[in-house]
Every structure is written in C-alpha cells, then in structure tokens.
Image (cartoon, grey):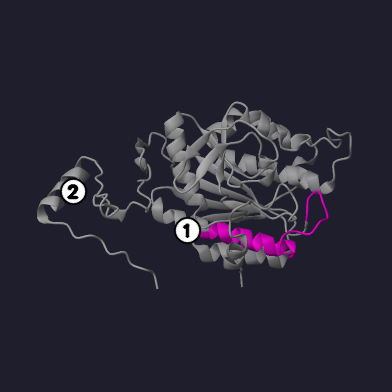
Amino acid sequence: MKKQKNLPKINIFRKNFVKICRIFGYEIIDQSNFFVPTQEKFLDDNLSIPGKKSITLPLGEIKISRKVTSFTVIFRSCTSVNMLTQSKKRLFDKSKSEYTFRSLNSLIESLKNAINDFPLVEFNFIVIDHNSNKSDLNKMKDMLKKSDLKNEIISLNVNEFKEKIETINEKNEKVTDNQISNMANIHKSLITAKLKNKDLTYFVEDDYLHHKNTIKEMIFTYERVASQMNKELILCPADYPYLYTKIENTSIFLGSSRHWRKVDETLCTFLTSAIIVDKYWDKFISMCQFEHYPFERPLHDIYKSELCLSPIPSLALHFTNVNSIFGLSPISEWGKIWSENEVF
C-alpha cells in the first residue's frame, strides 16, 4: 500500500494568502514543517512545474523559456547479435533477447511515469529492428501494444544504406557485417527522427536498462538547463565508468533529482533536439558512412561546440561485461532494477 503523507493544516487567513500567491505565481515555504502550501507538497518532493518553472532549493526558480513539446524514443533492436565488437559475456549472463526485453520494458515504464508529469508533451516510441527472430519481434510488439503508448516498428533494410558505407575503416581493416548493420540502423534512426519528430529524440540501443524516473529527469533537466543556458543540449543518461579514467575539467549542473556534468565523450545512446540534428546533420551521417576510431568520434566533435551532459549517479546501465569501462555505472542498485524489469 502506498504511504500517504499527512498535509499540515492551515488557518483561514493563511488559506487566503496561499490562494493569492498561487494567482500571482509565487511560491511560499513553511520551513518549520518542510512544507510548500502553494503546491501542497513537501520540500523533498519535486516542486518544478513542467514547461513553466524549475525549482531547486535554496536556489529558487528558473523560468522555463525552452519548453519541451514532444519526446520520441527511437529504439534500435537486434536480438540476433549478442555483442557487436566482442565475444565476452554480459552482466547477468543472459541471451541477447533478454536484455532487449528488459531494456524495452524499462523504457516503457519510464515513459509511462513521465506522462504523469508531462501531460502536454507528445510521446512516441519507434523501434527500428534488424534481423530479430519472429518470436522476439512479436513479444516486442505485444509489450508496446499493452503499454498504450503511440508506437511503430520499422524493419531495417540494410541494403538501403550498404552502398553508402565504406568497406575499409579508419584502422585500415574490413568493416564487419555486424558493424555495417549497426551503421545502417543509426542512419535509419537519424532519418526517422528528422522526418517524424519536431523536438526531442532519444536514440537508444537495446542493451540499456533505465531507472523508472529516467525520462522524467531528462525532460526536467533539458527544460531547466536549456532555459538557463539559452541553448540546445545533448543528454546521455549513462554515467560510464570510462569517464573516470582520466582527470578533466568539467561543469556541474542541477537537474531535478540528479547532478549533471559536462562530458566530451559518449557512446551512441543519447538524447538531443531536432535543432541539433539539423545543425550537425553531416556530422551525424558521417558516423554512418565511415567507421571512425573511436566509432563515436563525430559525436565527440559535436560536443566540442555543444553542451553534452551526463548524470551522477547514472540513470541507465549499459549491458556489457562486468569489467568493461563502457558498462557498469557506479552507485546504483542495478540488480534490483534488473529484477523489476523481468518480462513474463
């Protein structure tokens, strides 16, 4: 049973004063009982109002000038390939389809949670699938159907992009078939985002497990920091271990329930706006046509000019080997979150 909070009682004079404050958009705080009567919330609740103001105590509020209007998840799936570039076993030692199902479920639950806070945002879920077997694909379709989210599944045709991909990479090695399909899927994702989304797109691989509040935190943070900085952003929800392997200067920002720090590198799971995608279209596409080293270098070039932020602690876990510097994000209960997202 959900625990109910008992709201403090207030007298008639204070009730009228609270009503006046609400009319003029002011917030008042009763620090004696940790209560905000204008919102009927406690100070440890989320006090921000989507699309209007971001509130962090004791720093006060930031007026939201960059309101999020739509949010699309583009989920790149392929249950037939266990690991793209290595043969080591992943965390929890399961089949690739199990990671795909739990990743998909965690995103569905996170989106449903965000809808409660952002009823005016248009949410959409698009799966771009390559070569998953029929039973896996049917299970994903069933999960999305039960979610009641607006959704679509697109089957990737690698031949649509194959001739645009150089067969020899930057290391003067032959590009593998798995990498070619990966590059084609990223290319299709970018084209789909450009055609179908007017605001934020979350490009995500099918081996990332998400906290329930991931999507909500990313939207609150995008609105807050973009309004604060008066510029578009890139957000990566994973706090990768490799970000701690070297000492670099950074900047720290406040989100809703996380600190966010400026980073100069990510993998290919990230959130950004249609404005950023259009502005750096050639850079994004170059990642799909030539295998750089590291593969994500075009993204890193964009981060030299645009602000990319990553949360502390992490909002998502990348399912790699336990010893990989690109996987297990620190200071989170991933075993618990893994269990919560089992799909029956």
Given residues 136 and 95, the one toward you in this image is 95
Q: Position of residue 84 (x, y in %)?
A: 78, 50
SS for dot 1: helix
Q: Count the marks: how many?
A: 2
SS for dot 2: helix
Given residues 242 and 140, the one toward you in this image is 242
Q: Is residue 220 above or below residue 170?
A: below
Amino acid type, callout 2? Val
| Residue that badge 2 annotates | 18
Amino acid type, callout 1? Lys
Q: Is residue 236 magenta?
A: no
- Which quadrant: the C terminus? bottom right
The answer to whether residue 69 is left or right of residue 74 is: left
Range covered by the magenta-colored residues: 83-109
Residue drawn 46% across the image and 34% down it: 226
Q: Evaluate whether residue 127 shows in this view.
A: no
Q: Which mark is residue 11?
A: none
Q: CA distance from mark 1 to mark 2?
A: 32 Å
| Residue that badge 1 annotates | 112
Q: Evaluate whether residue 65 shows in this view.
A: yes
Q: Position of residue 125 (x, y in %)?
A: 55, 53
| Residue 88 in which image quadrant | bottom right
- Which quadrant: the N terminus? bottom left
Q: Position of residue 116 (x, y in %)?
A: 40, 56
Q: Is residue 103 magenta?
A: yes
| Residue 56 in which image quadrant | top left
Residue drawn 36% across the image and 38% down it: 59
